[in-house]
Image (spheres, rainbow, N blue to C red):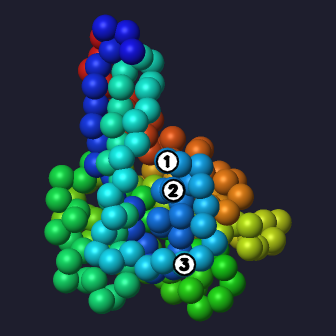
Amino acid sequence: MNAIGKKFKFKIIVIGDGMVGKTSLIKKFTKGSFRPEYIKTIGAQFFVFDKEINEDKIRLLFWDIAGQVDFNFLRTSFFNKSQAAIIIYSLEDNDLGKKSFNHIVDWYRDISKYCCEIPVVIFANKVDLVDENSFDDSKIQKLVDEHDFLGFYKTSAKTGAGVNEAFNAIIRKLYYTHKPLS
């Protein structure tokens, strides 16, 4: 890094129902890996990822928060000092997909209550399991517009589709919001 570069540190919470692929997406972005077997997150997991933008060093702290109801009592304690949030839901055409989509607003209410106004982005995960041509963006776009989310991205932790674009959108938002004008 050049001597003129600045250092930034951002805490990003990653939330959504259990089994939507939160941990898998973080691992795909930070390590380039994917494990097909499901391992339930207990409480929260913490991932660190370093990135450089315009000679500035950025340390990202991803807090992967368990989505199961069993962890409701713990969850909000992990929200403290978060600077951005990623809400993940499953695109699968099954019970998980429907429930995880319907819970987006609940997750957003928690973010608003415990984090105040921070940028929020939606990841529509498991795009590899659906016919993308038959996917109707209008319902998720309506939520994005109603709640002023940063946007939504279709992702697949398995194939890597959309993963870098989605994570980099929230990282760029944080970076350019916090970088002093020079």
Residue 16 at x, y percent in the picture: 43, 73
Question: On screen, 134 above or below 14?
Answer: below
- Which residue lies at the image location 65% right of the left edge and 89% below the top edge? 94
- Specify whether 32 is left or right of 4: right
Let me know if residue 171 appears in the view: yes
Q: Which residue is disc 2 drawn over?
A: 27
Residue 43 at x, y percent in the picture: 28, 75
Q: Which residue is disc 1 drawn over?
A: 30
Residue 10 at x, y percent in the picture: 29, 42
Question: On screen, 6 above or below 134?
Answer: above
Mark linked to residue 148: none
Query: What whole-number distance in Å separates the C-alpha atoms at marks 1 and 2?
Result: 5 Å
Q: Residues within 10 Å of mark 3 (few under 14, many from 20)?
A: few
Query: What whole-number distance in Å separates the C-alpha atoms at marks 1 and 3?
Result: 18 Å
Q: Earlier in the sequence, mark 2 or mark 3?
A: 2
Q: Which residue is disc 3 drawn over?
A: 38
- Which residue lies at the image location 33% right of the left edge and 15% below the top edge? 5
- Which residue lies at the image location 30% right of the left edge and 89% below the top edge? 70
Q: Residues within 10 Å of mark 1 (few under 14, many from 20)?
A: some
- Specify whether 89 is left or right of 91: left
Q: Quadrant of the C terminus?
A: top left
